[in-house]
Image (cartoon, coloured by chain):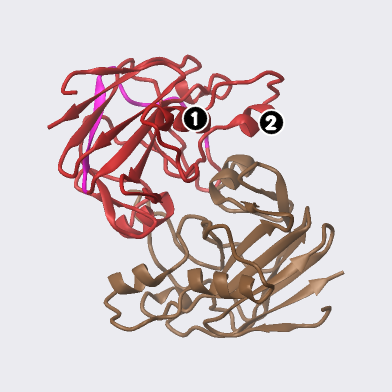
Chain colours: A red, B brown
Amino acid sequence: MSELQQLPARQGRAVALKAGQSIRIVNTHGHQVVDTWAFNAHDLGEFLSMEHMRAAIDRISPKPGDKLVTNKRRPILSLEADSSPGVHDTFIAACDIYRYQGLGCKEYHENCADNLRAGMAGLGLTPSEVPSPLNLWMNIPIKTDGSIGWEEPVSKPGDYVVLKAEMDCIVAMSACPQDIVKINAGAPTDAHYEVLA
Amino acid sequence: MSELQQLPARQGRAVALKAGQSIRIVNTHGHQVVDTWAFNAHDLGEFLSMEHMRAAIDRISPKPGDKLVTNKRRPILSLEADSSPGVHDTFIAACDIYRYQGLGCKEYHENCADNLRAGMAGLGLTPSEVPSPLNLWMNIPIKTDGSIGWEEPVSKPGDYVVLKAEMDCIVAMSACPQDIVKINAGAPTDAHYEVLA
């Protein structure tokens, strides 16, 4: 597994990591949001939780060195490295069929919630639910009046993060297919990942 | 039910609302956080979801007039009135046994997650999970560097919010028992509520 794998545009993948292994997720073209989840490999009901993580790190978004915790407040991942400016979102739900219906889509639109399910299914697994994801490179600025923006990523081609498994876990990723709201600069693309020993 | 009910300090309660009814939740002593949840009365797997709500209202916290949506992006509550300065939290998980263990408690500590379960049990119900709550009056400022604070409420005694049911729902509330971190000014108290026709 120690070679670069494709995370195809608009699709999802999942990989099993042993505690101590790391995964490097690459924003190959620089403007792609990657929704990311992690589940305890031995209990899919325990998973990376944004609302517990924020309380644990006392920040709205993680920085290198931070331990990211589950809904049982146990570290499941740590953010080892981030070559990008560190603009990631922890506030916004994965896009889903309801989101695209609300945006006016009459036909099925690929979405991160279904991509999570498809990625996990590739390992023969079913997620316990669709937790709020760690949205790598998603740029949701908070303005002084409490309103939020939906902006393009500020990352550059080849930027990456390295996430280390703090327990045996399943990491799932979706190359976000959002092409209506401009969070992927209007053009969803491939990303890549590799498992590091 | 159209009279003021006690939400005892450190405890939880739940009430069933028909679509069109409202609940007024009162911060009787002015410095009490009330964790608040809402579940579709006919499908407890559908519930008020902070990460979907933020995307729907384009804000980090609701204002009067906002419709608050579920994990299926359907309105379940609307915020009809807020006599307080409007400082409420949508980022932080309900406190739970793991939180108090992490804060050094060796014995059981009352917590909002168990209060949700107890409040729902009072209606013979079991929540499908512990969703991230709408933390009324919880003051978690975001600083310019992305770090968060844990501050005392800025509300005054008697401040209230009115939430209108947009579907038949169960509203659960916990008078947050947090007495280590200073979010309740160190002194958890009663709050009150009343159902409005």
Q: Secondary structure at mark 2?
A: helix
Q: How far apart in space, not on screen, are marks 1 and 2 (Cα)?
A: 15 Å
Residue at (26, 77) in percent of width and height? B104
What range is drawn magenta here? A149-166
Magenta-colored stretch includes residue A72: no
Q: Secondary structure at mark 1?
A: helix
Please state the horizontal and vertical placement of residue A171, each as a whole percent of the image: 32, 36
- Give the answer, above or below, for where A14 lies relative to B171: above
| Disc 1 packing (10 Å; few <14; some 14–19; many ≥20) | many
Can I make out residue A34 in this image? no
Magenta-colored stretch includes residue A162: yes
CB-based contact (under 8 Å), mark 1 and mark 2: no
**Count of marks placed on residues:** 2
Q: Which residue is mark 1?
A: A112
Please state the horizontal and vertical placement of residue A174, each as a whole percent of the image: 42, 27
Residue at (74, 55) in percent of width and height? B42
Q: Amino acid at mark 2?
A: Gly
Residue at (41, 32) in percent of width and height? A120
Q: Which mark is residue A102?
A: 2
Name the quadrant of the C terminus of chain A: top left
Can I make out residue B58 in this image? yes
